[in-house]
Image: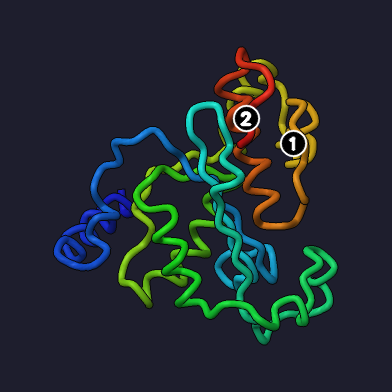
Amino acid sequence: MLRALRRAADRRRQAHGDHGWLFTPYTGEELVAIDCVTTGPDPRRAELLSLAAVRLRGDRVLTSDSLDLRLARPASLCGDSIRLHGLRGIDLADGAGIDEALAQFLDFVGNRPLIGWRLDDDLTLLNRYLRPRFGFDLPNASIDVAQAYYRRLRRQHPELATRPRFEEVAERLGVPVMGRHTALGDAVTAALIHLRLTRDALGVERFC
């Protein structure tokens, strides 16, 4: 309820601004899979290192139509986070500023529905950056692939108490893990998992 009220207030404030169009209902057929690589696991405190998005249309993951951004090195980058994602300070030497990266991201995703693995974490992180700079949270409809898979699994096996990990789900569904721990690779893999969950009868998804 609180999220809906905040979205309605954001829509009113942005109605005549540069970003008002993001709040209009999407009438197309595309989705956008997104992923963030951060300095730590807590989206309320972690800093953004890289951000990626890839479009889906029908049963296709449009890998040729994607966004893959690395940001400037944050002061909190340390050995523990580097061991997790492999992004070193030198890899971020020419990274984009956060304002530039967010502007590119908003332009790329538009008002399309968003999908991702544990998407709420990514949205919490992105909204932390967006609200003080742009004055709103992402208004897009969203689909959390992890929750969708877990709901299906619980229907089939209600006795299960644990949630499978990203790699386990991909393996169970026969989906290739694309560049694990890279933002673009995880976004593409999440997109493929989504397609497999919703279009099992179509077989192997196509790329372009």
Disc 1 to disc 2: CB gap under 8 Å: yes
* Left or right: residue 203 compared with residue 168: left
Displayed quadrant of residue 36: bottom right
Badge 2 density bin: few <14, some 14–19, many ≥20, Cα 10 Å: some
Residue pictured at 74% horizontal, 36% vertical:
164
Choose between 94 and 153: the one closer to the eye: 94
Residue pictured at 31% horizontal, 54% vertical:
2
The quadrant in which the C terminus is found is top right
Residue 149 pos. (x, y %)? 62, 30
Choose between 26 and 57: the one closer to the eye: 57
Residue pictured at 39% horizontal, 45% vertical:
112
Q: Kindly tell me whether residue 46 is visible in this rendering.
A: no
Residue 88 pos. (x, y %)? 79, 76
The kind of residue tagged 2 is: Tyr
Badge 1 density bin: few <14, some 14–19, many ≥20, Cα 10 Å: some
Residue 23 lies, with reference to residue 62, above or below; the image says below
**Residue that carries the numbered disc 2 in the rendered image:** 149
Mark 1–mark 2 distance (CA, rounded to whole Å): 9 Å
Residue pictured at 39% horizontal, 33% vertical:
29
Query: Element at badge 2?
Result: helix
* Left or right: residue 126 compared with residue 40: left
Disc on the earlier residue, 1 or 2: 2
**Residue that carries the numbered disc 1 in the rendered image:** 164
Residue 38 pos. (x, y %)? 66, 67
Residue 65 pos. (x, y %)? 54, 48
Query: Element at badge 1?
Result: loop
**Residue ranking furthest to the bottom:** 75
The kind of residue tagged 1 is: Pro
Residue 151 lies, with reference to residue 19, above or below; the image says above
Choose between 195 and 132: the one closer to the eye: 195
